[in-house]
Amino acid sequence: MGGLVRKPKDLLSGTLFIALGLFFFLEAQNYAFGNVRRMGPGWFPSAVSLLLIATGTVVAVQSFFGRHGERLTFAWLPLVIVLASIAAFAVLLRPAGIVVATTVLVLGSAYAYPPVRFLPMLATGLGLGVFNAIVFVRLLGLPFPIFGPWLGPLQRLVGG
Amino acid sequence: MDLLAALALGFSQALQPINLMWCLVGVLLGTLIGVLPGLGPTATIAMLLPITFGLSPVSALIMLAGIFYGAQYGGSTTAILINVPGEASSVVTALDGYQMARKGRAGTALATAAIGSFFAGTVATVLLALFAPPLAELGLLFGPAEYFSLMVLGLVASIVLASGSLVKALAMVFLGILLGLVGQDVQTGTPRFTFEIRELMDGVGFVLVAMGMFGIGEIVRNLETPELRTVMVKQVTGLIPSREDLARMIGPIARGTGIGSVLGVLPGGGAMLSAFAAYTIEKRTSNPPEGFGNGAIEGVAAPESANNAGAQTSFVPMLTLGIPSNPVMALMIGALIIQGVTPGPTLVNEKPEIFWGVIASMWVGNLMLVILNLPLIGMWVRLLTVPYAFLYPAILVFCGIGAYSLSNSTFDLWLLVLFGGAGYLFAKLECEPAPLLLGLILGPMMEENFRRAMTLARGNFGTFIERPISAGLLIVAALALVVVLSPAMRKKRQQVFTEEAK
């Protein structure tokens, strides 16, 4: 271990807070500031982002002192797979419909936790898709298609 | 309206078949998610919020409330049976509950939890009915300055109770407030931080943030360190406690209920703190204390009563002042606002059927939990054996559908991806999401009240300490900060949270 930084997690979070604070502060300067009697839309966000920068600085500075903290590791693969599966769901929901979108999300996200048993997962996805079609589309009337325009014949078969 | 008439109105609402049904759905769903790992009430309520759009406000709130206290119940079941607390509030139940289960007394432990919860729920319902209306009247005296100070107190409390670093929690609050300001400025109509994205004009939905940070972020964390769960107890017997057991649990249940009822009202308080405080007090006062940690029935009775009482009294600030004391309450406020009902001091007079209906439904719901869950325990045990590999994809699907149906837009799904990633990042950085979520919800309200208070006071910052109620609230907030920052308390606090993490 050793090194100057005692708590890498704090250094990173402090820096992140400062960066986000600066971002909000600079953007807030585009809005009318007003005065303390009649505050414009820029007053409050400017004040809060300065507070965020200040606390972020404290967090960052603290990371150089005290006991050594844990090192930071990320599980990139599960994270990316899960987020990408939701993104696929977002893309597929309207053009392909809930059944396909559900199946893709279930099957895709399963790869975040190997080993994957393909057929049982596929069956789970399809089953859940049909369940969603019945409960959310037919019974609760949520406005997304069972099968979307990409699957024209199936769409006509179930009537939407 | 006197108390009896009010309660009668409440029960006439809660006992309507349609509301009974939603209450049942709520407590069952709540128990289910309490039993299932990696899915808390915050994420579930966020997920199911869109479903309530079609319900009446009373039914919607009854169901969501059912999820909340049902989850406490389910969480304690897993705490006892497999030493994995399904909910943060059942962490301490696992200490003695699991030991009882190992000694073949799982049934007694579960029954103790059920009896304690039910008793606490009953008392908390009565307390809620007694104290909420006067508090609402006090709330009517509040001006913008008082509201601002009250929210400061709420945010301070959420920082004090956050389990990690205080400064980080404070930064999360500020970040949350800033996120809450995204969208059109209420007073001038200026779009802020929207970057010409039409969907951002109404702001960042807190439901999406909750779902992303508490749901998705949590799932990825679980995948990183898969938890081994083995169900020790295949068959649960001996559900009826003996006379001796009953005698031993009376005291702890009564004390736990008292502690929980008081702590639950505090902003940022609620179930978890209540359970922990109740357990500590029982351990301190019991003679001899050695039984604790080895399957003491008191160690199950006290925290289980306390967390249920705390869960229920945490509705007080929400229903009477419109201030959420925890993320779940914030979601409830969201649900009400979507229904066109603004929670606050006027709710009890303007919509008594909602106010009293929800209160009465809590008692009904608790009764349902006792009656239904003892026989259903076998089913919950079997559910525990569903592998996580099948569970989390299904949770993701329901999150996706929930996010989309908030405003029928794919954009919300992209926000879900964004906040899911952010949730994981913050979890890895040990920055707690709860203060951020509270900041996000309170941010716009705080700004509005701050601006109005300053305009009324002609730009005099002193208004917040010159007005007595406002000053009192700020003093309490300052005291809370001082106490928690004092070296002695810091040490104690660290000890408490490490003990809890075990």
Image (spheres, coloured by chain):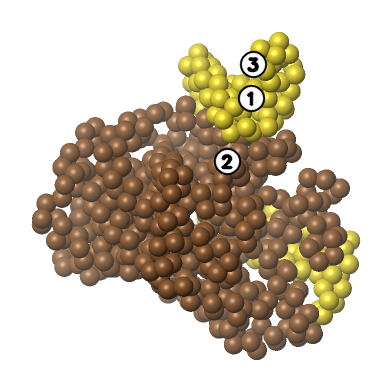
Name the element at disc 2: helix
Place residue A137 in its image quadrant.
top right
User: Residue B360 in the image: x percent, y percent?
Assistant: 41, 58
Q: Where is residue A10 in the image (x, y as percent from the top left)?
A: 60, 56
Residue holding disc 2: B51
Say which amino acid is labelled 1: Ile
Chain letter of disc 3 in the image: A
Q: Residue placed at 52% from the left, 59% from the top?
A: B354
Mark in front: 1 vs 2: 2
Please name the amino acid that badge 3 sits on. Val
Q: Exactly how many numbered labels are in the figure? A: 3
Q: Which amino acid does label 2 sit on?
A: Ile
Residue A158's disc number: 3
* Residue depth check, mark 1 versus mark 3: number of the one nearer the observer: 3
- Colour of chain A in the rendered structure image: yellow
Chain B hue? Answer: brown
SS at circle 3: helix
Chain to which mark 2 belongs: B
Q: Which mark is residue B55?
A: none
Res. B84 image quadrant: top left
Mark 1 and mark 2: Cα distance apart in space:
16 Å
Q: Label 1: which residue?
A: A98
